[in-house]
């Protein structure tokens, strides 16, 4: 327990007080504004380890330099012989050895947990639920609230930012797709390849759109043609075959004798010699077939001596030989011409290749995809074709020259076989190479021709361009999906976190509702019973379940005579005493729900559990206090109702082991101090007793006369003004209540409206008015109520 207050410095009324011993049951008397609420906040700060309650109650001093706050208590356990200090210095509690629970009932408890003014706010309902459902359930509720209001809120906030960023990105691209569908798009594995493909498709689209716009020109463009040179090998072989032919009836020796005969007998050689001989053979010898008896028609010589020569002449100038010569010579001439035509045609290949290349370039502007590549391949093959064409022509011209000579030789001696071949390995090789290159070239030309056919068809409709646009759009989305992958991954992660968090919240809420459902109804029944015992019969407190935010909230429903009191009716049916009694009932109910061991480890501080207007509740309140005093570790009661405290003191002072202490808070110059009172009945603060006398008169105590009250009102009002505005009045001089009001008005400490009211009070309380109305009880009672209300409700500043 707390054995003594060793020091309270710089907190509210307590400028620097201490060394007052506390008992297991301690009664503290102090009028309003003497420091009772300051004490309750000190104990609340200790229980919660929250120095903010102290910081907000910084003392006001004459020199306007308040001392640094310091609180020091000594604690003593039943088993300890020595006391140990706990303290709060520099806004920090040093209380590691303080293991008690502290429960505080005061106006703050009422405002936080039950009523805000005259109404029960949502804030009150949430706090009341936390107060009743137990620490474990409160922690679950806090966990839910933390998840929803902080963690889940932050996740949703981050999700919103990313979703907004992604939607703006999609809007910029005008992809005409919503975010969810966009997320489902599969991103490309290689962004480089994807972008290359996109460039290619965009180029293709541009080309196709151009072909459509220029469709008439496309139909008129010249197309490339294939190279189709004739194979010269069969022709050369045919020449070889003709050259190798011979006429068996004529041999070289006979032919030589014929030539010698011509040389001997023809004086002039003009090339007509053989024709003369032929004429003779065909004319004279055909008519005179027996050559042995014939004579030469020109020289009359006998022909019997040249019978073998005449045989040779007959063979040379026979019809068969003539046909042989015609056939061989005709074939050689024809094939020679064909061969030379092939040479001419091959020479034209270079021009054809150049023309094809020029035409292909014109088509290239309209080609897409691989067709572009094939144009370049045609260009490459064109160079090779021209190179091999030159070599091929050179070899063929060489063969043509040689064949011309051999043909000329053959014509001289058609019957003689020329065995020299014109077919060479060089020709065969060059032709094979040339043919292979031409075939490759023609394959690419064929591909281009097919593409040209397709292009002509595409230029007549828009289907291909529409298809390309779709492909481009899809590829664009894929690329954008890749570029936004990091943000999308973050979004997906946040969504998964959100999903898991919402599942956790749902599980926690279900757990919380299940746990609370077991005891919340009995809890409110218990509150109703205590409330009825404390002097508010016919009231019933029930709970209605609401879910606000993360945790369930049990909203108190107040019934009177089994009829529900609505929020707007509450201020008129529920008195101030009822509100305080209900709050005290809830507080007591919470305490009695603790286990016996928990209660034995609990220090309870009560600030005005009952007011001077609650005399009808004193007996029942005393019973609750008596039970608490013997059950909890320590009970401290601070009150301004001296009658209640004196009655409690008299009834409990003889109970064993209570260690009852009575302390009075007194005004001490500019602050308040503690005084230990051994006999409370004979020693209480005179000013406080005067205020209590007025309050008892208002409560129709017949032992107090109106005249005594009337004489006390003016000094009470003047002293309260001097105390409340002590800082403002420092160094000021004035005379009487009227002078005091004037001085406060001049300093701007009170409003004109407040000053007027004080002047009215001063006029009514002047001595020369007293005699005529001193014994008017009801008038004095009403005036007293107005002045007490003004002092403790309307007067500012409200001093801690």
Image (cartoon, grey):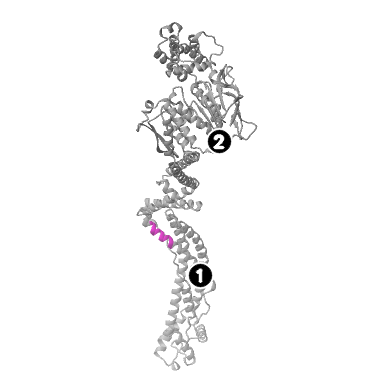
Q: Which residue is mark 1?
A: 432
- Tag 2 secondary structure: loop
Give x and y (percent) for residue 782: 40, 15
- Total labels: the figure holds 2
- Quadrant for the N terminus in the image: top right
Give x and y (percent) for residue 730: 56, 13
Q: Which residue is mark 2?
A: 601
- Tag 1 secondary structure: helix
Q: Does the magenta-highlighted stretch encompass residue 489?
A: no
Give x and y (percent) for residue 608: 49, 25
Give the camera-side residue of 345 and 60: 60
Q: Is residue 77 above or below residue 572?
A: below
Q: Is residue 697 above or below residue 147?
A: above
Give the camera-side residue of 615 and 29: 615
Q: Nearer the viewer, mark 2 or mark 1?
A: 2
Distance Cα–Cα, label 2 vs label 1: 113 Å
Q: Residues within 10 Å of mark 1 (few under 14, many from 20)?
A: few
Q: Residues within 10 Å of mark 2 (few under 14, many from 20)?
A: some
Q: Is residue 2 above or below residue 364?
A: above
Task: Please identify the dominant SS of the magenta region.
Answer: helix
Give x and y (percent) for residue 29: 53, 22
Residue 269 in sight in this render: no
Residue 398 in sight in this render: yes
Q: Is residue 587 above or below residue 692?
A: below
Residue lying at 50% horizontally and 74% vertically, measured from the top left: 403
Give the camera-side residue of 688 and 90: 688
- The magenta stretch is 446-455
Q: Does the magenta-highlighted stretch encompass residue 450?
A: yes
């Amino acid at each position: 327990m707390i054995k003594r207050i060793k020091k309270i410095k710089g907190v509210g009324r307590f400028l620097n007080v201490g060394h007052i011993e506390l008992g297991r049951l301690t009664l503290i008397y102090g009028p309003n504004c003497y420091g009772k609420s300051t004490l309750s906040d000190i104990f609340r700060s200790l229980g919660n380890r929250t120095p903010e309650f102290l910081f907000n109650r910084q003392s006001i001093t004459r020199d306007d330099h308040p001392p640094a706050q310091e609180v020091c208590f000594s604690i003593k356990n039943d088993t300890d012989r020595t006391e140990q200090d706990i303290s709060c210095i520099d806004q920090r509690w040093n209380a590691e050895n303080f293991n008690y629970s502290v429960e505080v009932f005061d106006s703050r408890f009422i405002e936080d947990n039950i009523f805000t003014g005259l109404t029960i706010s949502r804030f009150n309902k949430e706090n009341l639920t936390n107060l009743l459902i137990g620490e474990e359930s409160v922690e679950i509720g806090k966990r839910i609230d933390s998840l929803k209001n902080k963690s889940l809120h932050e996740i949703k906030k981050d999700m919103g930012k990313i979703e907004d960023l992604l939607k703006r990105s999609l809007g910029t691209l005008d992809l005409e797709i919503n975010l969810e569908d966009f997320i489902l798009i599969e991103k490309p594995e290689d962004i480089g390849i994807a972008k290359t493909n996109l460039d290619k498709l965009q180029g293709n689209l541009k080309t196709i759109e151009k072909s459509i716009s220029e469709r008439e020109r496309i139909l008129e463009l010249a197309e490339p043609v294939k190279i189709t040179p004739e194979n010269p090998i069969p022709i050369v072989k045919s020449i070889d075959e003709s050259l190798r032919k011979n006429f068996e009836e004529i041999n070289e020796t006979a032919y030589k004798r014929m030539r010698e005969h011509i040389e001997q007998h023809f004086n002039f050689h003009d090339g007509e010699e053989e024709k003369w001989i032929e004429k003779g053979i065909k004319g004279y010898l055909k008519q005179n077939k027996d050559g042995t008896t014939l004579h030469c028609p020109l020289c009359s010589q006998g022909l019997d001596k040249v019978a073998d020569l005449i045989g040779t002449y007959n063979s040379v100038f026979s019809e068969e030989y003539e046909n042989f010569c015609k056939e061989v010579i005709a074939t050689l001439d024809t094939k020679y011409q064909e061969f030379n035509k092939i040479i001419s045609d091959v020479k034209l290949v270079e021009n054809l290749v150049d023309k094809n290349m020029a035409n292909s370039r014109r088509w290239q502007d309209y080609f897409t995809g691989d067709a572009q590549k094939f144009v370049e391949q045609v260009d490459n093959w064109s160079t090779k074709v021209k190179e091999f064409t030159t070599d091929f022509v050179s070899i063929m011209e060489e063969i043509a020259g040689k064949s011309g000579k051999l043909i000329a030789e053959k014509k001289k001696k058609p019957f003689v076989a020329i065995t020299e071949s014109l077919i060479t390995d060089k020709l065969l090789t060059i032709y094979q190479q040339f043919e292979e290159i031409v075939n490759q070239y023609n394959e690419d030309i064929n591909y281009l021709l097919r593409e040209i056919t397709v292009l002509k068809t595409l230029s007549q409709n828009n289907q291909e361009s529409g298809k390309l646009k779709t492909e481009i759009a899809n590829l664009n989305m894929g690329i954008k999906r890749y570029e936004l992958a990091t943000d999308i991954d973050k979004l997906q992660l946040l969504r998964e976190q959100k999903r898991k968090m919402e599942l956790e919240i749902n599980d926690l809420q279900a757990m919380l509702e299940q746990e609370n459902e077991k005891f919340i109804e009995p809890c409110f029944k218990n509150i109703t019973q205590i409330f009825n015992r404390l002097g508010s019969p016919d009231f019933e407190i029930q709970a209605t379940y609401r879910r606000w935010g993360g945790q369930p909230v049990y909203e108190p429903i107040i019934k009177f005579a089994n009829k529900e009191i609505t929020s707007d009716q509450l201020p008129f049916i529920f008195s101030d005493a009822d509100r305080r009694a209900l709050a005290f009932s809830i507080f007591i109910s919470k305490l009695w729900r603790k286990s016996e061991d928990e209660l034995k480890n609990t220090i309870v501080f009560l600030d005005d559990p009952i007011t001077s207007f609650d005399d009808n509740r004193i007996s029942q309140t005393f019973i609750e206090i008596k039970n608490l005093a013997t059950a909890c570790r320590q009970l401290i009661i601070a009150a301004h109702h001296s009658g209640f405290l004196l009655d409690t003191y008299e009834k409990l002072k003889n109970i064993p082991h209570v260690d009852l202490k009575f302390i009075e808070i007194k005004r001490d110059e500019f602050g308040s101090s503690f005084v230990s009172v051994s006999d409370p009945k004979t020693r209480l603060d005179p000013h406080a007793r005067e205020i209590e006398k007025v309050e008892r008169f208002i409560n129709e105590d017949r032992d107090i006369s109106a005249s005594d009250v009337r004489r006390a009102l003016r000094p009470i009002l003047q002293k309260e003004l001097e105390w409340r505005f002590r800082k403002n009045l420092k160094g000021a001089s004035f005379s009487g209540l009227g002078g005091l009001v004037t001085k406060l008005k001049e300093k701007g400490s009170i409003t004109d409206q407040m000053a007027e009211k004080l002047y009215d009070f001063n006029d009514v309380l002047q001595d020369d008015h007293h005699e005529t109305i001193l014994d008017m009880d009801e008038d004095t009672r009403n005036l007293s109520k107005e002045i007490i209300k003004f002092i403790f409700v309307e007067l500012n500043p409200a001093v801690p």
